Image (cartoon, helix red, strand yellow):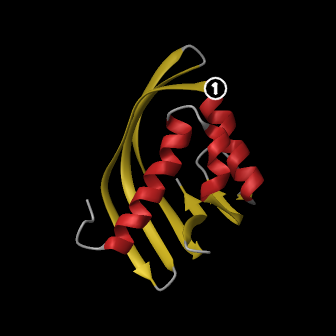
Amino acid sequence: MFSDDPVKQEVWETLRELNDAWVRGRPEELKAYLHEDMVAITATDRDRLEGREACAEAWSVYAKKARIHHWKELEPRIQIYGGTAVATYYFDISFLYNGQTVAFSGREMLVFVKVGGKWLAVAGQR
């Protein structure tokens, strides 16, 4: 997708691996993609999530309760600022949750920083 820019391609691959971890029911892998100081603002939590553990736990709880039928990232845009990357995209999702099928579209922004040669998510908003 970003074959003309290897740095953007690296960020995109990291984002896809992060999403695959929770979408495919492997939430225990999430911590490998999150910075220890990660913060996230979600549509369902009143307060922001602070720290790798809290963010991974929130994704993990959701992944365990929801049975994902469909997930697709759309129209990604990645902007690079030195060792920081801002990734925005739209998504479509459908899943079974508490016995009900839910389908909707949304948008997400993830900010990544490069630490030790690896891109880690440090902030997110959905």
Snapshot quadrant of residue 104: top left
Q: Amino acid at mark 1?
A: Lys
Position in image of residue 102 (x %, y %) = 46, 25
Observer able to see residue 25:
yes
Q: Is residue 76 left or right of residue 22?
A: left
Mark 1, other Cα within 10 Å: few <14 / some 14–19 / many ≥20: few
- Residue that sits furthest to the bottom in the current view: 82
Position in image of residue 3 (x %, y %) = 24, 66
- Residue that sits furthest to the left in the current view: 4
The residue sitting at 33% across, 72% down in the picture is: 6
Viewer-closest of 52 and 95: 52
The residue sitting at 63% across, 39% down in the picture is: 27
Snapshot quadrant of residue 48: bottom right
Position of the N terminus by quadrant:
bottom left
Mark 1 — residue? 65
> Label 1's element?
helix
Position in image of residue 45 (x %, y %) = 68, 47
Q: Is residue 98 above or below residue 119?
A: above
Observer able to see residue 108:
no
Viewer-closest of 29 and 79: 29
